[in-house]
Image: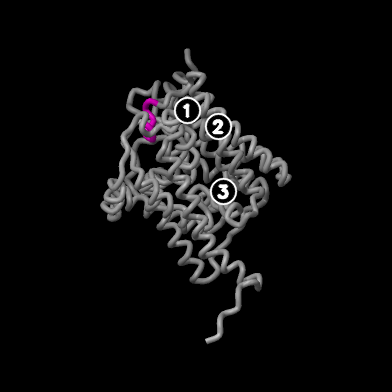
Protein backbone atom coordinates (compact mmCIF):
# COMPACT_ATOMS: atom_id res chain seq x y z
CA UNK A 1 0.00 0.00 0.00
CA UNK A 2 1.11 3.55 -0.68
CA UNK A 3 3.01 5.02 2.30
CA UNK A 4 1.18 8.31 1.83
CA UNK A 5 -2.18 6.56 2.18
CA UNK A 6 -0.94 4.76 5.29
CA UNK A 7 0.11 8.08 6.81
CA UNK A 8 -3.25 9.68 6.06
CA UNK A 9 -5.10 6.68 7.52
CA UNK A 10 -2.99 6.92 10.67
CA UNK A 11 -2.99 10.69 11.26
CA UNK A 12 -6.12 11.79 9.45
CA UNK A 13 -6.37 14.12 6.46
CA UNK A 14 -6.09 17.48 8.22
CA UNK A 15 -3.20 16.52 10.47
CA UNK A 16 -1.29 14.93 7.57
CA UNK A 17 -1.64 18.13 5.55
CA UNK A 18 -0.56 20.32 8.47
CA UNK A 19 2.35 18.03 9.33
CA UNK A 20 3.65 18.27 5.77
CA UNK A 21 3.41 22.04 5.97
CA UNK A 22 5.22 21.99 9.31
CA UNK A 23 8.13 19.94 7.95
CA UNK A 24 8.50 21.96 4.75
CA UNK A 25 8.15 25.23 6.65
CA UNK A 26 10.70 24.20 9.27
CA UNK A 27 13.25 23.27 6.63
CA UNK A 28 12.64 26.56 4.81
CA UNK A 29 12.98 28.52 8.05
CA UNK A 30 16.19 26.73 9.00
CA UNK A 31 17.89 27.26 5.66
CA UNK A 32 16.56 30.81 5.20
CA UNK A 33 18.01 31.74 8.59
CA UNK A 34 21.38 30.16 7.94
CA UNK A 35 21.74 31.63 4.44
CA UNK A 36 20.25 35.08 5.26
CA UNK A 37 17.89 34.67 2.30
CA UNK A 38 16.18 38.04 1.78
CA UNK A 39 14.73 39.77 -1.29
CA UNK A 40 15.03 43.23 0.28
CA UNK A 41 18.75 42.81 0.86
CA UNK A 42 19.24 41.60 -2.72
CA UNK A 43 17.35 44.58 -4.14
CA UNK A 44 19.33 47.05 -2.02
CA UNK A 45 22.61 45.54 -3.23
CA UNK A 46 21.57 45.95 -6.85
CA UNK A 47 20.17 49.46 -6.26
CA UNK A 48 23.51 50.54 -4.81
CA UNK A 49 25.54 48.82 -7.54
CA UNK A 50 26.99 46.47 -4.92
CA UNK A 51 25.71 43.13 -6.23
CA UNK A 52 27.16 40.64 -3.80
CA UNK A 53 26.36 37.84 -1.37
CA UNK A 54 22.69 38.67 -0.77
CA UNK A 55 21.92 38.78 -4.51
CA UNK A 56 23.81 35.52 -4.98
CA UNK A 57 21.79 33.75 -2.31
CA UNK A 58 18.48 35.08 -3.63
CA UNK A 59 19.36 33.95 -7.17
CA UNK A 60 20.31 30.48 -5.91
CA UNK A 61 16.99 30.15 -4.09
CA UNK A 62 14.94 31.61 -6.92
CA UNK A 63 16.52 29.44 -9.61
CA UNK A 64 16.35 26.29 -7.47
CA UNK A 65 12.61 26.79 -7.01
CA UNK A 66 12.14 27.21 -10.76
CA UNK A 67 14.27 24.20 -11.64
CA UNK A 68 12.64 21.77 -9.21
CA UNK A 69 9.11 22.92 -10.04
CA UNK A 70 9.60 22.67 -13.79
CA UNK A 71 11.36 19.31 -13.42
CA UNK A 72 8.43 17.92 -11.44
CA UNK A 73 6.06 19.06 -14.18
CA UNK A 74 8.17 17.48 -16.91
CA UNK A 75 8.32 14.20 -14.96
CA UNK A 76 4.55 14.15 -14.52
CA UNK A 77 4.79 14.51 -10.74
CA UNK A 78 3.06 17.88 -10.62
CA UNK A 79 0.32 19.42 -12.75
CA UNK A 80 -0.52 23.13 -12.76
CA UNK A 81 -4.09 22.64 -14.03
CA UNK A 82 -5.58 23.42 -10.60
CA UNK A 83 -3.05 26.00 -9.47
CA UNK A 84 -4.92 29.17 -8.52
CA UNK A 85 -2.21 31.50 -9.87
CA UNK A 86 -2.81 30.07 -13.35
CA UNK A 87 -6.33 28.68 -13.52
CA UNK A 88 -8.40 31.53 -12.05
CA UNK A 89 -8.88 35.13 -13.12
CA UNK A 90 -6.04 37.39 -12.03
CA UNK A 91 -5.45 41.09 -11.58
CA UNK A 92 -2.64 42.88 -13.36
CA UNK A 93 -3.51 46.14 -11.63
CA UNK A 94 -3.40 44.35 -8.29
CA UNK A 95 -0.05 42.80 -9.16
CA UNK A 96 1.42 46.13 -10.24
CA UNK A 97 0.08 48.34 -7.45
CA UNK A 98 0.33 45.68 -4.76
CA UNK A 99 3.87 44.78 -5.80
CA UNK A 100 4.94 48.43 -5.63
CA UNK A 101 3.41 48.86 -2.17
CA UNK A 102 4.96 45.62 -0.94
CA UNK A 103 8.39 46.66 -2.26
CA UNK A 104 8.14 50.01 -0.48
CA UNK A 105 7.00 48.31 2.70
CA UNK A 106 9.73 45.68 2.82
CA UNK A 107 12.43 48.38 2.64
CA UNK A 108 10.76 50.42 5.39
CA UNK A 109 10.35 47.31 7.58
CA UNK A 110 13.84 46.09 6.62
CA UNK A 111 12.60 42.72 5.49
CA UNK A 112 9.79 41.00 3.62
CA UNK A 113 7.14 39.01 5.45
CA UNK A 114 9.08 35.74 5.42
CA UNK A 115 12.24 37.48 6.61
CA UNK A 116 10.32 39.13 9.47
CA UNK A 117 9.09 35.71 10.59
CA UNK A 118 12.62 34.30 10.47
CA UNK A 119 14.03 37.24 12.44
CA UNK A 120 11.21 37.19 14.99
CA UNK A 121 12.06 33.57 15.80
CA UNK A 122 15.59 34.70 16.70
CA UNK A 123 14.39 37.34 19.18
CA UNK A 124 14.03 40.42 16.97
CA UNK A 125 11.14 42.30 18.59
CA UNK A 126 11.02 44.81 15.72
CA UNK A 127 10.31 41.95 13.33
CA UNK A 128 7.80 40.42 15.74
CA UNK A 129 5.73 43.61 16.02
CA UNK A 130 6.00 44.27 12.28
CA UNK A 131 4.92 40.71 11.51
CA UNK A 132 1.86 40.99 13.73
CA UNK A 133 0.86 44.29 12.11
CA UNK A 134 1.46 42.72 8.71
CA UNK A 135 -0.87 39.83 9.55
CA UNK A 136 -3.58 42.14 10.93
CA UNK A 137 -3.42 44.34 7.84
CA UNK A 138 -3.53 41.30 5.56
CA UNK A 139 -6.65 40.06 7.34
CA UNK A 140 -8.26 43.52 7.13
CA UNK A 141 -7.46 43.56 3.41
CA UNK A 142 -8.84 40.07 2.86
CA UNK A 143 -12.17 40.28 4.65
CA UNK A 144 -12.13 43.44 6.76
CA UNK A 145 -12.28 47.18 6.51
CA UNK A 146 -9.65 47.41 3.75
CA UNK A 147 -11.23 44.76 1.50
CA UNK A 148 -13.36 47.24 -0.56
CA UNK A 149 -10.22 49.19 -1.49
CA UNK A 150 -8.41 46.00 -2.40
CA UNK A 151 -11.29 44.78 -4.55
CA UNK A 152 -11.65 48.14 -6.31
CA UNK A 153 -7.96 48.30 -7.20
CA UNK A 154 -7.91 44.65 -8.27
CA UNK A 155 -10.78 45.19 -10.72
CA UNK A 156 -9.04 48.00 -12.61
CA UNK A 157 -7.21 45.58 -14.93
CA UNK A 158 -7.95 41.88 -14.88
CA UNK A 159 -6.69 38.92 -16.86
CA UNK A 160 -8.44 35.61 -17.55
CA UNK A 161 -7.13 32.32 -16.24
CA UNK A 162 -5.54 29.57 -18.29
CA UNK A 163 -3.03 30.33 -21.02
CA UNK A 164 -3.61 34.06 -20.59
CA UNK A 165 -1.84 33.87 -17.20
CA UNK A 166 0.82 31.36 -18.29
CA UNK A 167 4.04 33.09 -19.28
CA UNK A 168 5.41 29.89 -20.83
CA UNK A 169 2.33 29.67 -23.06
CA UNK A 170 2.83 33.31 -24.04
CA UNK A 171 6.43 32.65 -25.02
CA UNK A 172 5.63 29.29 -26.62
CA UNK A 173 8.63 27.58 -24.99
CA UNK A 174 6.86 25.07 -22.75
CA UNK A 175 8.15 23.64 -19.50
CA UNK A 176 11.43 22.61 -21.11
CA UNK A 177 12.05 26.29 -21.82
CA UNK A 178 11.09 27.09 -18.23
CA UNK A 179 13.64 24.58 -16.97
CA UNK A 180 16.34 26.05 -19.20
CA UNK A 181 15.46 29.53 -17.95
CA UNK A 182 15.90 28.33 -14.37
CA UNK A 183 19.25 26.75 -15.20
CA UNK A 184 20.47 30.04 -16.68
CA UNK A 185 19.52 31.89 -13.49
CA UNK A 186 21.24 29.18 -11.43
CA UNK A 187 24.40 29.70 -13.47
CA UNK A 188 24.15 33.45 -12.82
CA UNK A 189 23.66 32.85 -9.11
CA UNK A 190 26.59 30.43 -8.98
CA UNK A 191 28.80 32.95 -10.80
CA UNK A 192 27.94 35.70 -8.34
CA UNK A 193 28.32 33.32 -5.41
CA UNK A 194 31.79 32.24 -6.48
CA UNK A 195 32.80 35.82 -7.15
CA UNK A 196 31.64 36.89 -3.70
CA UNK A 197 33.08 33.75 -2.08
CA UNK A 198 29.96 33.06 -0.05
CA UNK A 199 30.32 30.38 2.59
CA UNK A 200 28.87 26.90 2.55
CA UNK A 201 25.70 27.91 4.35
CA UNK A 202 25.10 30.53 1.69
CA UNK A 203 25.27 27.89 -1.04
CA UNK A 204 23.39 25.13 0.78
CA UNK A 205 20.89 27.38 2.51
CA UNK A 206 20.01 29.38 -0.58
CA UNK A 207 19.49 26.33 -2.76
CA UNK A 208 17.64 24.37 -0.08
CA UNK A 209 15.29 27.26 0.71
CA UNK A 210 14.35 27.42 -2.96
CA UNK A 211 13.86 23.67 -3.17
CA UNK A 212 11.26 23.89 -0.40
CA UNK A 213 9.05 25.88 -2.78
CA UNK A 214 9.09 23.01 -5.26
CA UNK A 215 8.55 20.50 -2.46
CA UNK A 216 5.48 22.41 -1.31
CA UNK A 217 4.02 22.37 -4.84
CA UNK A 218 4.60 18.61 -5.07
CA UNK A 219 3.28 17.84 -1.58
CA UNK A 220 0.02 19.78 -1.88
CA UNK A 221 -0.56 18.39 -5.39
CA UNK A 222 0.01 14.87 -4.10
CA UNK A 223 -2.30 15.41 -1.14
CA UNK A 224 -5.00 16.96 -3.32
CA UNK A 225 -5.11 13.71 -5.27
CA UNK A 226 -5.41 11.58 -2.13
CA UNK A 227 -7.70 13.51 0.18
CA UNK A 228 -11.47 13.23 0.06
CA UNK A 229 -12.14 16.91 0.77
CA UNK A 230 -11.07 19.49 -1.86
CA UNK A 231 -7.55 20.68 -1.09
CA UNK A 232 -5.86 23.64 -2.81
CA UNK A 233 -2.69 23.01 -4.74
CA UNK A 234 -0.33 25.66 -3.39
CA UNK A 235 3.21 26.43 -2.40
CA UNK A 236 4.82 28.70 0.18
CA UNK A 237 3.38 32.15 0.80
CA UNK A 238 3.07 34.37 3.86
CA UNK A 239 0.36 36.98 3.25
CA UNK A 240 -2.90 35.03 3.35
CA UNK A 241 -1.40 32.25 5.53
CA UNK A 242 -0.21 34.76 8.16
CA UNK A 243 -3.70 36.23 8.31
CA UNK A 244 -5.19 32.73 8.60
CA UNK A 245 -2.85 31.79 11.44
CA UNK A 246 -3.67 35.02 13.28
CA UNK A 247 -7.41 34.40 12.98
CA UNK A 248 -6.98 30.79 14.07
CA UNK A 249 -5.23 31.96 17.24
CA UNK A 250 -8.14 34.30 17.95
CA UNK A 251 -10.86 31.78 17.07
CA UNK A 252 -12.35 29.02 19.23
CA UNK A 253 -10.36 25.76 19.19
CA UNK A 254 -11.36 22.80 17.09
CA UNK A 255 -11.07 24.40 13.64
CA UNK A 256 -9.73 22.09 10.86
CA UNK A 257 -6.02 22.17 10.13
CA UNK A 258 -4.47 22.83 6.72
CA UNK A 259 -1.09 23.23 5.03
CA UNK A 260 -0.71 26.92 5.93
CA UNK A 261 -1.39 26.30 9.62
CA UNK A 262 1.57 23.94 9.67
CA UNK A 263 3.84 25.91 7.35
CA UNK A 264 3.88 29.30 9.11
CA UNK A 265 4.68 27.93 12.60
CA UNK A 266 7.13 25.57 10.92
CA UNK A 267 9.14 28.47 9.48
CA UNK A 268 9.28 30.05 12.94
CA UNK A 269 10.38 26.76 14.51
CA UNK A 270 13.01 26.09 11.85
CA UNK A 271 14.50 29.55 12.20
CA UNK A 272 14.54 29.24 15.99
CA UNK A 273 16.40 25.93 15.77
CA UNK A 274 18.89 27.44 13.32
CA UNK A 275 19.45 30.46 15.56
CA UNK A 276 19.90 28.22 18.58
CA UNK A 277 22.32 26.02 16.65
CA UNK A 278 24.37 29.07 15.57
CA UNK A 279 24.06 30.84 18.94
CA UNK A 280 22.36 33.80 17.29
CA UNK A 281 19.29 34.10 19.52
CA UNK A 282 19.22 37.65 20.83
CA UNK A 283 16.52 40.06 21.97
CA UNK A 284 16.55 43.23 19.87
CA UNK A 285 14.17 46.18 20.15
CA UNK A 286 13.46 49.52 18.53
CA UNK A 287 15.84 52.46 18.64
CA UNK A 288 13.51 55.41 19.09
CA UNK A 289 10.04 56.36 17.96
CA UNK A 290 11.05 57.17 14.38
CA UNK A 291 12.24 53.60 13.81
CA UNK A 292 9.00 52.22 15.21
CA UNK A 293 6.87 54.42 12.94
CA UNK A 294 8.93 53.32 9.97
CA UNK A 295 8.49 49.61 10.72
CA UNK A 296 4.77 49.99 11.34
CA UNK A 297 4.27 51.86 8.06
CA UNK A 298 6.25 49.21 6.21
CA UNK A 299 4.25 46.37 7.74
CA UNK A 300 0.94 48.01 6.80
CA UNK A 301 2.07 48.56 3.20
CA UNK A 302 3.25 44.96 2.93
CA UNK A 303 0.05 43.57 4.41
CA UNK A 304 -2.21 45.49 2.03
CA UNK A 305 0.15 45.23 -0.94
CA UNK A 306 0.72 41.52 -0.54
CA UNK A 307 -2.99 40.78 -0.34
CA UNK A 308 -3.71 43.03 -3.33
CA UNK A 309 -0.93 41.44 -5.38
CA UNK A 310 -1.96 37.91 -4.42
CA UNK A 311 1.33 37.05 -2.79
CA UNK A 312 4.45 38.22 -0.97
CA UNK A 313 8.12 38.14 -1.93
CA UNK A 314 8.05 34.35 -1.58
CA UNK A 315 4.42 33.64 -2.49
CA UNK A 316 4.44 35.63 -5.73
CA UNK A 317 8.14 36.34 -6.19
CA UNK A 318 9.28 32.72 -5.94
CA UNK A 319 6.33 30.29 -5.72
CA UNK A 320 4.23 32.05 -8.37
CA UNK A 321 7.26 32.75 -10.53
CA UNK A 322 8.21 29.06 -10.40
CA UNK A 323 5.00 28.17 -12.29
CA UNK A 324 5.50 31.19 -14.56
CA UNK A 325 2.27 32.96 -13.67
CA UNK A 326 2.22 36.30 -15.50
CA UNK A 327 0.77 38.12 -12.52
CA UNK A 328 3.51 36.75 -10.25
CA UNK A 329 6.25 38.05 -12.54
CA UNK A 330 4.54 41.46 -12.70
CA UNK A 331 4.38 41.47 -8.90
CA UNK A 332 8.05 40.53 -8.59
CA UNK A 333 9.12 43.26 -11.02
CA UNK A 334 6.97 45.82 -9.20
CA UNK A 335 8.50 44.80 -5.87
CA UNK A 336 11.97 45.44 -7.25
CA UNK A 337 10.93 48.85 -8.55
CA UNK A 338 9.17 49.88 -5.34
CA UNK A 339 12.04 48.71 -3.15
CA UNK A 340 14.68 50.36 -5.35
CA UNK A 341 12.89 53.73 -5.38
CA UNK A 342 12.39 53.60 -1.61
CA UNK A 343 16.04 52.83 -1.02
CA UNK A 344 17.06 55.72 -3.28
CA UNK A 345 14.65 58.20 -1.71
CA UNK A 346 14.71 57.14 1.94
CA UNK A 347 17.71 55.05 2.94
CA UNK A 348 20.51 56.26 0.70
CA UNK A 349 20.29 59.92 1.78
CA UNK A 350 20.36 58.79 5.42
CA UNK A 351 23.34 56.54 4.78
CA UNK A 352 25.13 59.32 2.92
CA UNK A 353 24.49 61.78 5.74
CA UNK A 354 25.74 59.27 8.31
CA UNK A 355 28.91 58.80 6.28
CA UNK A 356 29.46 62.52 6.07
CA UNK A 357 29.04 62.63 2.29
CA UNK A 358 25.67 64.34 2.12
CA UNK A 359 25.77 67.66 0.25
CA UNK A 360 25.91 70.72 2.47
CA UNK A 361 22.62 72.60 2.73
CA UNK A 362 22.38 75.68 0.57
CA UNK A 363 22.69 79.04 2.30
CA UNK A 364 19.57 81.21 2.37
Position of residue 44 measured from the top left corner of the image (x, y, whole percent): 57, 55
Disc assigned to residue 38: 3
Position of residue 14 measured from the top left corner of the image (x, y, whole percent): 39, 31
Q: Secondary structure at mark 1?
A: helix
Q: How is the image coloured?
A: one colour
Cα distance in 3D space between marks 1 and 2: 24 Å
The earlier-in-sequence mark between 1 and 2 is 2
Q: Residue furthest bottom?
A: 364
**Residue at position x 47%, y 37% in the image:** 321
Q: Is residue 204 above or below residue 136?
A: above
**Residue at position x 46%, y 23% in the image:** 78
Query: Which residue in the protein does label 1 denote?
Result: 219
Q: Is residue 360 above or below residue 334?
A: below
Cα distance in 3D space between marks 3 and 1: 24 Å
The earlier-in-sequence mark between 3 and 1 is 3
Our reading of the magenta stretch's main secondary structure is helix
Q: Are marks 1 and 2 in contact (CB under 8 Å)?
A: no
* Residue 272 is covered by the magenta coloring: no
Q: Is residue 352 above or below residue 73?
A: below
For label 2, the crowd category at 10 Å Cα-Cα, with few meaning under 14, some 14 to 19 and many 20 or more, is: some
Question: Range of the magenta residues?
Answer: 81-86
* Residue 121 visible in rendering: no
Amino acid sequence: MDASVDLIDWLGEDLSLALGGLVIGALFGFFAQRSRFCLRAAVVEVARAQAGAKLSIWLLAFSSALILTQTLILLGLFDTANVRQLSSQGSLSGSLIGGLLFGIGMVLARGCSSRLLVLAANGNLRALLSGLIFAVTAQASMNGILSPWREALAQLWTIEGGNARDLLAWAGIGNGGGLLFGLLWLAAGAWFARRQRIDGWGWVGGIAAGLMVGCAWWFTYRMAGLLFDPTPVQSMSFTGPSADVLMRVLSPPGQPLNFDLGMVPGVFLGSFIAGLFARELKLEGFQGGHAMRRYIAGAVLMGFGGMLAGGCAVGAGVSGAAVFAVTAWVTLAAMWVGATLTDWLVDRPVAAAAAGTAPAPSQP
